[in-house]
Amino acid sequence: MSTTAEPAAAIESGVWLHGVAAEVAPATLAGITGIAGTPARAVTAAGLVAVVSDAPLAEYGEEALRRNLEDLAWLERAARAHHAVVDALSRSGAVVPARLATVHRDDDRVTRVLVERHDELAGTLTRLTGREEWGVKGYVVPGATPPTGEPAGGGGAGVAYLRRRKAQLTAREEGQRITADAAAAVHAALAGYAAAARRHAPQDRRLSGAPTAMALNGAYLVDRDRLDGFAVLVRELAERHPEIRLEPTGPWPPYSFVAEPSAEPAWA
């Protein structure tokens, strides 16, 4: 007695989730390539739209993902492909980005997520509507902190060396304190202007590519009709705090604001 085998496509591909929106026009998805070069498409349920792309399980299944996520080159390619879809969605309206490497078995599982998490996702979309995420990074400016005076002489060469060394350490600690205070003041001012704010850990110089250390790595959710004022505030703060060089970046999809700091994303 023969049996009919399940179609290969049904068992060889999972569904990579890029993000959720209240609505997505077909023209927005036209021509957008998702993960693994497959086209982005919509899964609709409960008044929400999940934008997904098909992900071959040979590369994006559970075991393969665990292995590939340790490969930085692979991770960068996947992150760029994921971000390209989320960025395109964010340019046409509010979107809740999914965490990188969120893969479901099939469209039915994605539909279940939309139904079960409807209130949470809809509330987040309401909060994000009409707003953009902007980043402001602050880099240490060498020599911008006031120098300390030369320590008094006397006591021989050895004692003089120890005095100079102590003065250097004191100056370094004082410079670090001044820089930290400036970064805190800048973040407080920007957070007071924005609808929401997050202060992330500073990036390592190998990642940031900057010649000096990062003192501030802030993210700010700003109303679109207040963006001009935000830009003016950044310039004013840069003049007020020459100890750090401020670099605004954006707009970004609201990666920093899809969950409270202590909470996992909606579809962990």
Image: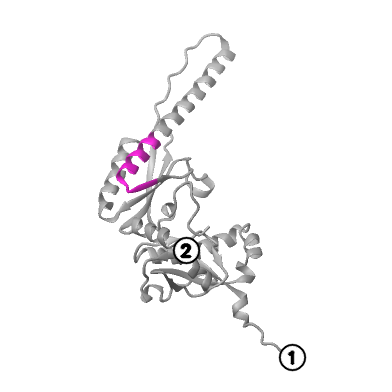
**Residue 58 percent across, percent down from the top left:** 64, 71
Secondary element at image label 2: helix
Residue 30 position, x and y percent, is 41, 76
Tell me if residue 163 is in the magenta stretch. no
115, 187: nearer the viewer = 115
* Magenta segment includes 196: yes
Could one spot residue 199 in this view of the protein? yes
Q: Which residue is mark 1?
A: 1
Q: How many neighbours does mark 1 have within 10 angstroms: few (below 14), some (14-19), or many (20 or more)?
A: few
Coloring scheme used = one colour
Looking at the image, is 109 positioned above or below residue 72?
Answer: below
Q: Is residue 243 visible?
A: no
| Earlier-in-chain disc, 2 versus 1 | 1
In the rendered view, would you say 213 is above or below 163?
below
For this rendering, which residue is in front, 211 or 233?
233
Q: Residue 199's spot in the image, x, y percent? A: 43, 43
Residue furthest to the right: 1
Which residue in the structure is indicated by mark 2?
Answer: 116
Q: Amino acid at mark 2?
A: Glu
Q: Which residues are magenta?
A: 182-197
SS of the residue under disc 1:
loop
User: Marks 2 and 1, Cα distance to the nearest angstrom?
Assistant: 42 Å
Q: Quadrant of residue 144?
A: top left
Q: Quadrant of the N terminus?
A: bottom right
- Residue 146 in percent (x, y) is at 39, 26
Residue drawn at the location 47% of the way across and 25% of the way down: 171
Instruction: Give the camera-side residue of 97 and 167.
Output: 97
Disc 1 residue type (three-letter): Met
Which label sits on residue 145? Answer: none
Relative to residue 100, is residue 173 depicted above or below?
above
Q: Residue at (39%, 62%) from the top-left corner? A: 95
The secondary structure making up most of the magenta span is helix
